[in-house]
Amino acid sequence: MNRGQKKKTSSVALLAWIIVPVLMVFAWKVAILVTLGMLPTLVALVIDRRPEKYAAYCVGGFNLCGLVPWVVKLFVDGQTGLALQHIMTNPFSWLVIYGAAAMGWLVFSWTPELVLRMTAFRDRQEISSLQKRQETLVEEWGPDIIPPRAEEF
């Protein structure tokens, strides 16, 4: 880890140590909602063994997108206990929050396969194009331009 990365990490940690207590004191209802809503991201962070934590980024992004409308609703409703209770007891809110996280898991798990298939398709197209180009060159220059294969030696 170089010096710039270490400094960035320490500044993020310092910022978290400042923001989290302030959030817990002044907006504890939001903190409860965010903590419970972001549980799928925490699970992704724990079970992803790669140091880059791609699962946490993918699931966390989707999870946060599903959570933001409810956090905004909580702020608009005045951060009252009743507003938090309404969100927490509404199955639709949890469906949106955890459904978005599930979409993140789907994207995370299906993207490598999709990229692999697209790359294979592109490679087959390239091979076909090169074979047509080779046939054109053979017609133009004759069969002597094709080098002998290694197994023919």
Image: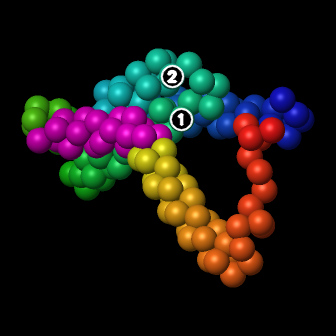
**Residue 95 in sight from this viewpoint:** yes
Disc sitting over residue 54 in the figure = 1
- Contact between labelled residues 2 and 1, with CB atoms less than 8 Å apart: yes
Q: Which residues are magenta?
A: 92-113
Q: Is residue 150 above or below residue 40?
A: below
Q: Residue at x 11, y 41 (%)?
A: 92
Quadrant in the rendering for residue 123: bottom right
Foreground residue among 25 and 53:
53
Name the amino acid, label 2: Asp
Name the amino acid, label 1: Tyr
Instruction: Identify the mark nearer the N-term, 1 or 2.
Output: 2
Number of numbered discs on residues: 2
Quadrant in the rendering for residue 2: top right
Q: Is residue 95 left or right of residue 111?
A: left
Give the residue at mark 2.
Answer: 48
Task: Name the secondary structure under disc 1.
Answer: helix
Q: Residue at x 10, y 35 (%)?
A: 91
Foreground residue among 105 and 61:
105
